[in-house]
Amino acid sequence: METRKPYPGIGHALLLLLLQFCLVLGLYLLTGIAAAVSGLALDEKSPLLTLMDVLAYGIVLYVGFRQARTPFRTVFAFTSFPVALLLPLIPLVIGTGIVASEVDNLTRWLFPVPQIITDFFGDLLRPDLLSLIAVAVIAPANEELLFRGLILGGFLGRYPLRTAVLGSAAIFALFHLNPYQFFTAFVAGIILAWLFIHTRSLWPCIAAHSLFNAQAWAVANLVDLGVPGYDPVNPASTVVDFQPLWFDALGIALFAAGVLLVRRIAPQNRPAEAAAR
């Protein structure tokens, strides 16, 4: 009798993303129709649309969980981890943000940003509490359950380690549907997968993802370091400046320090020892 391969594979993961996009579009359309019929004002800042996003993720996660035919705690591994691990996430995320910002500068220098992308990021990182909650709380939780919980978990039981990590990161980057975010999302996907493999827990992945997004929101709205070209994960500006070399070096140093500290605090789960589902 042939053993059933862990779910999902790459094809299944792409179908889950297609389902998620279709659900979001459908729920947005239904919400818009309901708002028009009832006479309610509805725009892109409405909490109802954020609720529709959560509902779409919930449906996709339920479908994927049912297909996996695996215990809930295995698919969505909210296991304990050393709390001290949260500290090195700060230099790891800040360093990644600095490096990603410079890569984004180069990308925008080579390929100017279309106005539609500028408008999208300006709205996504708008200076209000709902935007902060959406990007720093809701999005990290939804995306980590899907990409590191369901998708990476299935890939680790189905493919070699490198294929699982790079494949899940590539799908995570593709999910953003934005070439100006691809590099940042791909690198973030690798880092988040690495965190999951070392800790076997989604908690540090959600925490790191939240820090990534909160950093972009804070730099866009609250913090001005006065460093030319520094604007992590936010290609909303049409002006291209490159960061000083010392700032790029600082980003690389912070990233390296974060990686070393994570490995030092969480050595019990080496990448080669990732358990198959």
Image (tube, rainbow, N blue to C red):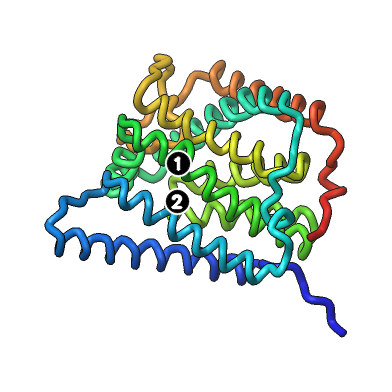
| Quadrant housing the C terminus | bottom right
| Left or right: where 132 falls relative to 97 | left
Q: Residues within 10 Å of mark 1 (few under 14, many from 20)?
A: some
Alpha carbons under labels 1 and 2: distance apart: 9 Å
- Nearest the viewer among 277 and 251 is 277
- x and y percentages locating residue 106 in the rendered image: 46, 36
Q: Is residue 252 visible?
A: no
| Left or right: where 236 falls relative to 34 | right
> Which dot marks residue 98?
none
1 or 2: tag closer to the N-terminus: 1
Residue at the disc numbered 1: 107
| Quadrant housing the N terminus | bottom right
- Nearest the viewer among 78 and 18 is 78
Q: Quadrant of residue 252?
A: top right
Q: Quadrant of residue 88?
A: top right
- Nearest the viewer among 174 and 133 is 133
- x and y percentages locating residue 224 in the rendered image: 38, 17
The residue depicted at 47 percent of the width and 23 percent of the height is: 243
Would you say the residues marked 1 and 2 are in contact, meaning their CB atoms lie under 8 Å apart?
yes
The residue depicted at 69 percent of the width and 26 percent of the height is: 258
Relative to 112, say whether 27 is above or below. below
Q: Residue furthest front?
A: 38
Residue at the disc numbered 2: 179
Q: How many marks?
A: 2
Q: Residue furthest left?
A: 39
